Amino acid sequence: MMIVAVRVILKTQNYSKINLMKKKLQQISMKT
């Protein structure tokens, strides 16, 4: 159970990082 929970947490962390990067890229593209 613990291993599965850790995997889910890692996936959600990676997903949130990707979302933050997309938002930053969108902001940069809006400025230029």
Image (cartoon, rainbow, N blue to C red):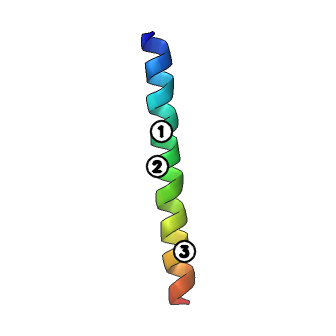
Reading the image, the residue beneath label 1 is 12
Q: Position of residue 27 (x, y in %)?
A: 49, 78
Mark 1: secondary structure: helix
Count of numbered badges drawn on the protein:
3
Q: Amino acid at mark 2?
A: Ser
Question: From the image, which quarter does the C terminus lie in?
Answer: bottom right
Asked if the residue under mark 2 is in contact with the one under mark 1, i.e. CB atoms within 8 Å, the reply is: yes
Q: Amino acid at mark 1?
A: Thr
Q: Position of residue 2 (x, y in %)?
A: 42, 12
Mark 2: secondary structure: helix
Crowdedness of circle 1 by 10 Å Cα count: few (<14), some, many (20+)?
Answer: few
**Looking at the image, which residue is at 54% across and 74% down?**
26
Q: Against 7, is 19 above or below? A: below
Reading the image, the residue beneath label 2 is 16
Q: Mark 3 vs mark 1: which is more N-terminal?
A: 1
**Looking at the image, which residue is at 54% across and 53% down?**
18
Mark 3–mark 1 distance (CA, rounded to whole Å): 21 Å
Crowdedness of circle 3 by 10 Å Cα count: few (<14), some, many (20+)?
Answer: few
Q: Amino acid at mark 3?
A: Gln
Crowdedness of circle 2 by 10 Å Cα count: few (<14), some, many (20+)?
Answer: few
| Residue 2: mark in rendering | none
**Looking at the image, which residue is at 44% across and 30% down?**
9
Question: From the image, which quarter does the N terminus lie in?
Answer: top left
| Residue 26: mark in rendering | 3
Asked if the residue under mark 2 is in contact with the one under mark 3, i.e. CB atoms within 8 Å, the reply is: no
Q: Against 14, is 3 above or below? A: above
Q: Against 27, is 19 above or below? A: above
Mark 3–mark 2 distance (CA, rounded to whole Å): 15 Å
